[in-house]
Image: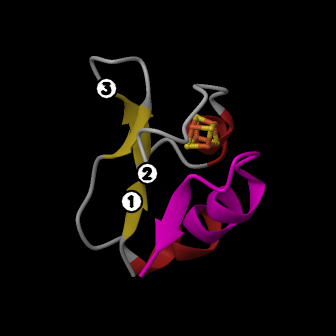
Amino acid sequence: MRVQVDQDLCISCGTCIDICPDVFDWNEDEKAQAVVGEVPEELENDAHEAVESCPTSAISEY
Ligand code: SF4
């Protein structure tokens, strides 16, 4: 799986980074972004939880 953060929807709450810091991190605009291409299998559950937990549904999973 891959994940992508819609920069227009991200409100910089930090939830995704708290849940899955190996996949999400802050960018220079102080928004979250994915820092990996393909999410490693062992991180898929956490990445999925981050997708589900984003308050603005800014993260797409594909
Ligand atoms: S959980 Fe959603 S709104 Fe919060 S930092 Fe992550 S992408 Fe942005």
Q: Are marks 2 and 1 in contact (CB under 8 Å)?
A: yes
Residue 35, percent from left and from top? 29, 47
Q: Earlier in the sequence, mark 3 or mark 1?
A: 1
Within 10 angstroms of label 2, few (less than 14), some, or many (20 or more) residues? Answer: many
**Coordinates of residue 19 in the picture (x, y in percent):** 66, 46
Precedes in sequence: disc 3 or disc 2: 2
Residue at image mark 1: 4
Name the residue carrying label 3.
27
> Residue at horizontal 55%, vertical 37%?
10
Q: Amino acid at mark 3?
A: Asn
Q: Position of residue 3 (x, y in %)?
A: 41, 66
Colour pattern: secondary structure
Closest to the observer, 30 or 39? 30
- The answer as to whether callout 2 falls within 8 Å of ligand 1 is yes
Residue 13's place in the image compared with 38, above or below, is above
Query: What's the magenta region?
Result: 47-62
At x 70%, y 47%, the residue is 56
Above or below residue 18? Residue 27 is above
- Residue lying at 37% horizontally and 42% vertically, measured from the top left: 33
Q: Residue at x 69, y 37 (%)?
A: 15
The three-letter code of the residue at mark 1 reads Gln
Q: Name the amino acid type tagged 2.
A: Val
- Disc marking residue 5: 2
Cα separation between marks 3 and 1: 13 Å
